Image (spheres, grey):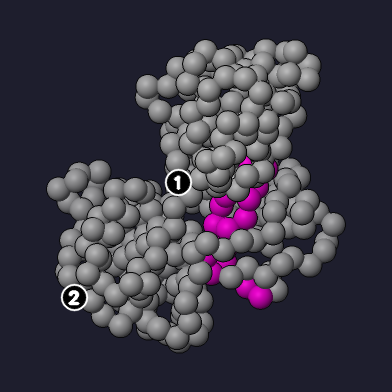
Amino acid sequence: MKMRVAGRRSLTADIEEFTLEPADGAALPSAAPGDHVTVETPSGAMRRYSLVHPSDAPETYVLAIKREAASRGGSASMHDAAVVGTILNVDAPENAFPLGEGHAALLIAGGIGITPIYAMAQSLSAQGRAFRLIYCTRDAAGTAYADDLRALCGDRLTLHHDGGDPERLFEFWDVLGEPTDAQVYCCGPTPLMEEVRGMTGHWPEGHVHFEDFKPVDVVRADDHAFAVVLQRSGITVEVPADRTILEALRDAGHKTVSSCESGTCGTCKCGLIEGEADHRDMVLMDEEKAGKIMVCVSRAKGDHLVLDL
């Protein structure tokens, strides 16, 4: 879908809210709690962002995007270049973090992980269902939607600020030590989700749900630079140690096709003609790995690869 940035506002010093409207005035697909959309950011990077407001008949989609300190071209591009009037390519909503029906819910969010959790809280409140929301951030100034959540949740909201001190983390055992009839929905940074995961191992299977858009490390500390030869044109592109093949191709002005950019969808699969690949995706079958590669996450084990591009 072609969507226009209809408005934007700063929620915190590093979180910006974007309101997107259909550029052609067409009706938008419904937005369920936990839905996300894939956005082609102004830099060309494809990124997934949760929808903030659920609706059966939305007129706009609202995203809240944090500028990541180590942005690889997605969040920084949105903050710097997605001004009001910018046209973006946006895929229809998908959901890998659905809110179940009927049961009570314990919602846990950390930082920008509040986006799908806020949508769930709105839906639960509208349905009159029992829920509690625990929202952990570094400080009050960095807490997006704090006033909206207080108005929506009342005493069902717990805000916790740790000041970045591990010794001041929320004591989750107080709420997770004894399993209840509620189901748990958690989204946030890896340490928070690992803490919750570790404390819910004794909960019934299927009662604890996590949202994580980072299934693989696309760049690692021990990665090295290498060259990629594009077989069809004979052009060689250098891939720095801190960039993916896909990013290096894009930086060099070569048109690329991608979607998830996390090794999970298969859109960027291409032929591997020569060289040994360091496969990091979650898509290729073992028998495919000798002749295929996912350029969004995988790399070369040696000094070069020859690709069917």
**Could you tell me if residue 158 is visible in this image?**
yes
Quarter residue 31 falls in: bottom right
Q: Residue at x 45, y 41 (%)?
A: 216
Amino acid under disc 2:
Glu
Q: Are marks 1 and 2 in contact (CB under 8 Å)?
A: no
The circle drawn on residue 178 is 2
Residue 169 sits above or below residue 232 on the image: below
Amino acid under disc 1:
Pro
Front position in the image: 270 or 268:
270
Q: Quadrant of the N terminus?
A: bottom right
Q: Quadrant of the C terminus?
A: top right
Q: Which residues are magenta?
A: 33-56
Q: Residue at x 51, y 76 (%)?
A: 123
Determine the CA span between mark 1 and mark 2.
Answer: 29 Å
Q: Residue at x 77, y 58 (%)?
A: 22
Q: Residue at x 62, y 44 (%)?
A: 266
Quarter residue 288 falls in: top right
Front position in the image: 261 or 84:
261
Element type at mark 1: loop
Name the residue tied to disc 1: 215
Q: Earlier in the sequence, mark 1 or mark 2?
A: 2
Residue 167 sits above or below residue 69 on the image: below
Q: Is residue 73 magenta?
A: no
Residue 160 sits above or below residue 183 on the image: above
Residue 47 drawn at (x, y percent): 59, 44
Quarter residue 129 falls in: bottom left
Q: Is residue 45 magenta?
A: yes
Residue 27 drawn at (x, y percent): 79, 67
Element type at mark 2: loop
Residue 124 drawn at (x, y percent): 46, 79
Crowd tier of the residue under label 1, counting other residues whose Cα lies within 10 Å: few below 14, some 14–19, many 20 or above: few
